[in-house]
Amino acid sequence: MGKLMRAAITKQKRFYIDRLLQTGLFHDSAALKQWTVSELRREYEQYGIRMKKRGE
């Protein structure tokens, strides 16, 4: 179970890092790799909310 959990977390982190890099707000993937999944998700969700408010 440990290997599956680690793989799932790694995949989730990659998803959030890729999406945050696509926004153009972040340019350093190495710095984002230091963040936890929770931190990445929070920033991703905040960006999504900002985009909805701006109508984009």
Image (tube, helix red, strand yellow):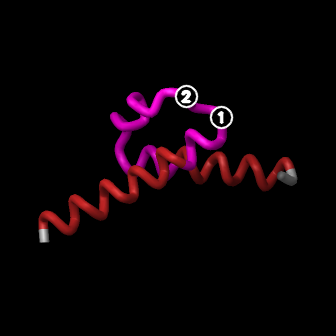
| Farthest-out residue, right | 55
Image x and y of residue 8, in percent: 30, 64
Q: Hey, what amino acid is under mark 1?
A: Gly
Q: Is residue 8 above or below residue 30?
A: below
In the drawing, what numbered circle is on residue 40? none
Q: Is residue 5 left or right of residue 48?
A: left
Q: Is residue 25 left or right of residue 55?
A: left
What span is in magenta? Answer: 19-42
The residue lying at 31 percent from left, 58 percent from top is 9
Secondary element under disc 2, as helix, strand or loop, is: loop
Q: Which residue is mark 2?
A: 27
Query: In this view of the protein, which residue sits in the foreground, 45 or 5?
Result: 5
Q: CA distance from mark 1 to mark 2?
A: 7 Å
The residue lying at 25 percent from left, 61 percent from top is 7
Label 1 environment density (alpha carbons within 10 Å; few <14, some 14–19, many ≥20): few
Q: Is residue 17 left or right of residue 52?
A: left
Q: Hey, what amino acid is under mark 2?
A: His
How many numbered discs, if any? 2
Main SS class of the magenta portion in the image:
helix
Secondary element under disc 1, as helix, strand or loop, is: loop
Asked if marks 1 and 2 touch (Cβ < 8 Å), the reply is yes
Query: In this view of the protein, which residue sits in the foreground, 18 or 47?
Result: 18
Q: Which residue is mark 1?
A: 24
Image x and y of residue 35, in percent: 37, 38
The verdict on residue 10 being magenta is no
Image x and y of residue 13, in percent: 39, 51
Q: Quadrant of the N terminus?
A: bottom left
The residue lying at 82 percent from left, 51 percent from top is 53
